[in-house]
Image (cartoon, rainbow, N blue to C red):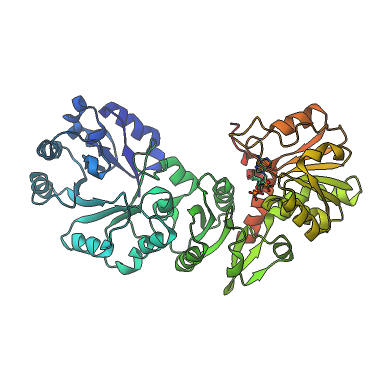
Amino acid sequence: MICLVLTGGTIEENVSLYERNKPYVDIVELRLDLLHESSRSRASIFPSLVDVPVILTVRRQIDGGVYEGSERSRLALIESSLDGDFAYVDLEDDIKRSAPEHKAREKHIRIIRSKHDFQGMPSDLYHRIAKISAKGEIPKLAVTPRSILDLITLFRVRTELKDVQEKIILGMGDYGLPSRILYKRLGSLWTYCADNPVAPGQISPQQMKELYRADRVNERTQIFGVIGNPVLHSFSPRIQNPGFHGINFNAIYLPFLVDSVRSFFILAEMLKISGFSVTVPHKQQVLPYLGKITREVKQIGSCNTVVRAKNLWMGINTDYYGFIEPLVTEIDNKNIQSALVIGAGGAARSVVWALRNHGCKVTIINRTIEKAQQLAEETMSSYDSLEHASSYSSVDLIIQTTSVGMIPDRDSDPIPDFTFNRNQIVYEMVYRPKYTKMLQRALESGCRLLFGIDMLVRQGKHQFEAFTGYHYPKRLEHSLQLEED
Ligand code: NAP
């Protein structure tokens, strides 16, 4: 089930919050600590105003809530609110033999026994859950994984406690996000979502239901993802998930914040992950774990896509193909014979190797000239310093591969003195914003433009093919655009 945490200040606000999210949620949690004081006494009417089960919670500050009164008044508020038809009441693990507890039992309201850890993971995680469950209550454990190893410990709940049918387990924070989305794989009864997050890592119910379709995950669902650090901003879930849905492929694609690639491969085995995209800074670090790589991965020395192939992991580089695709015909027709590549980082490596393999003459310019020299020597290209960009104003193609111009640095241009001419093609790899300062100048000079976002989508479509064996559904392609910033 998907649970909406109601964060409104009044009963009426919470009813409209529920109405707005109704298509996405199965259960709601009324947080009395977030209600204005004047509205709290009316909490008992709330369950009669909505048509889903309601959890009653008054969260203390030490557990991430905002309730400021005394503990006695908090318990009294819970007790009086239980006059309403709540389905569940959330009581903290350390509250023993309280009046709300007795009243809940009398009224057959199920007790959720919760424990929050905002610092890390309790060492007696499994024991705690088993103990609460033995008392006939529903254990809820919200912990904070700080690494992939912690996330592994969390996902082991499923096997360690497979006899505990009713439990709510979630990992907060960025490392915990996969546990929120794959809540069914943890054996958790539900996952918490909010329009305005009140706990670290919460996402909106609409994202949970429509983007991830988390409630549809079953034993046969294949898991895919993207690993990186940072990674939560990644656009890839918005390419892959709708694609899976579009071809009725039972799979989910989610972001994994990864501190250690080695640990991630352990998690990948444990969750039987079928494949994943790789982003900065792990594109080289995955190489030692791959049993098979393509020629491009070997040349470039980096891999952005890993798929399970029988009993080994296979690495491919879809940046290579996503980049070169719109240029191949022009290169074959000799309309493009020379290229200036700005930058010598990871993205530039795919670009230079792709151009070189297609027979195009390349000059690399970079802020750190030694890096340009190294890449040029590997690929039999030429190199120069960034300041000499103007000397190459007659090339057919200019490719911008540095991060200069990327939000929030949108007023920067890596080659401000370069004069474009209308016969040139200008290819920008930065995708946010779509029109960088450099591209705007190229547009004013009448150049043909190629955009970073389109390359991102093309490489994502290649990943989709590697993951599923099917083409990306054509009818969805028009929706693969970023909102303009
Ligand atoms: P990277 O390996 O860190 O390389 C960064 C490059 O930018 C280096 O050449 C670096 O020069 C240069 N650079 C950074 N700051 C600079 C500055 N202030 N002035 C001049 N040069 C500067 O990063 P990457 O993986 O290649 O990614 C680069 C960009 O490409 C990012 O914006 C990324 O989002 C984008 N990208 C887009 C796609 C796509 O599908 N559209 C795919 C991959 C990457 P030094 O060597 O001197 O440090």
Above or below, comparing residue 20 to residue 335 in the picture: above
Q: Is residue 73 visible?
A: yes
At a point 31% along the width and 34% down the height, the residue shown is: 7
Left or right side of 410 for 394: right
x, y percent for residue 27? 31, 44
Where's the C terminus, which quadrant?
Answer: top right
Q: Which of these two is toward me, 65 or 104? A: 65
Name the residue located 40 percent from the left edge and 53 percent from the top edge.
Answer: 176
Quadrant of residue 281 within the rendered picture: bottom right
- Residue at 10% x, 51% y is 96
Q: Nearer the viewer, residue 61 or 255?
A: 61
Up-down relation of residue 379 to residue 15 (above or below): below
Residue at 86%, 52% (x, y): give it: 360
Q: Residue furthest bottom?
A: 311
Q: Is residue 146 above or below residue 194?
A: below
Q: Position of residue 312 (x, y in %)?
A: 58, 72
Residue 321 visible somewhere in the drawing: no
**Residue 356, how many percent across, how many down?**
82, 56
